[in-house]
Amino acid sequence: MGGIDPDLSSDLAARVASELDPAERLVWAGQPRLDLMTRSAFLLVPCGIVFTAFALIWIVLAAFLSAGIMAPCGLPFVAVGILLMGSPIWLRWRARQMIYALTDRRALVWEPAWWGTVTVRAYTAAGLGRMSRTERADGSGDLVFEEFTTVSNGTNGTTSHTTRRGFLAIDHVREVEDLVRRTLLAPPAGS
């Protein structure tokens, strides 16, 4: 295993090449699997349907009961419901813009954000000490380089959200992990 994913578009391959230093050697590049990256949409779409239906019913009732004054207050909730129903589309778009690369010096992750911005995260050997792997029965999985939990205190209590970063939703996760370990974490020859 190694090299560039043959499905990587020429535009994305050019992004990888432009990020590398002249003496840096590309070992592997790929992207997340679309079906794995859009799995969360299976829950978001039904929630969006219910949310939108409830908001539309609220708008109709508000139009009759308040002579139309309160009806527009439901429009933001309709918008949220539509966004939830459209989650498979934007999750696929996001996954198609993500790129993973391993060089002889670092692991790189391109994460798209809103309005065309992209964050490029670099992980050197020093930052991979707590790397972990989650593997599915088909050999796909997540190679996590960084994981952190954000805790928020709100009116309804405390909520937490865990963020994982790395080579997520990839095929042959164990082989990619071995490649990362051999390339970045193996002791240099002769030591």
Image (cartoon, rainbow, N blue to C red):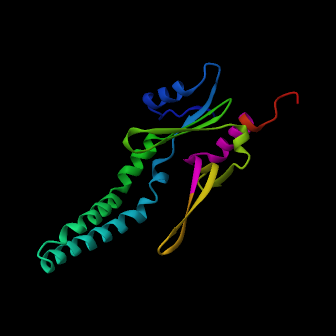
Q: Where is residue 76 in the image (x, y as percent from the top left)?
A: 28, 63
In the rendered structure, does residue 9 fall within the stretch colored magenta? Answer: no
Q: Does the magenta stretch include residue 178?
A: yes
The residue under the point 45% across, 45% down is 95
Horizontal and vertical percent position of residue 21: 60, 23
Name the side, left or right, on which 11 lies relative to 20. left
**Quadrant position of the C terminus in the picture:** top right
Q: Position of residue 98 (x, y in %)?
A: 48, 41
Q: Is residue 27 visible?
A: yes
Above or below, 164 against 14 in this view is: below
Counting every numbered tag in the picture gives 0
Q: Which residue is at a point 31% across and 67% down the rendered structure image?
A: 49
In this picture, residue 84 sits left or right of residue 164: left
Q: Residue 117 sits in which quadrant?
A: top left
Q: Is residue 140 visible?
A: no
Q: Give the residue drawn at x 46%, y 32%.
A: 12
Q: From this viewpoint, which residue is outermost toward the top?
A: 22
* Relative to 26, residue 121 above or below: below
Q: Which image quadrant for residue 45?
A: bottom left
The quarter of the picture where residue 29 lies is: top right
Measuring from the top left, give residue 178's x and y in whole percent.
71, 41
In the depicted view, which residue is nearer to us: 16 or 59? Answer: 59
Q: Which of 110 and 8 is in front in this view?
A: 110
- Seen from the viewer's position, the closer of residues 150 and 6 is 150
Residue furthest bottom as drawn:
65
Q: Residue at x 36, y 67 (%)?
A: 46
Image height of 51 relative to 85, above or below:
below
Say above or below: 65 vs 123: below
Please state if 8 lies on the left or on the right of 145 as rendered. Answer: left
**Segment colored magenta:** 163-183
Where does the N terminus fall, quadrant-wise? top right
Who is closer to the viewer here, 70 or 190? Answer: 70
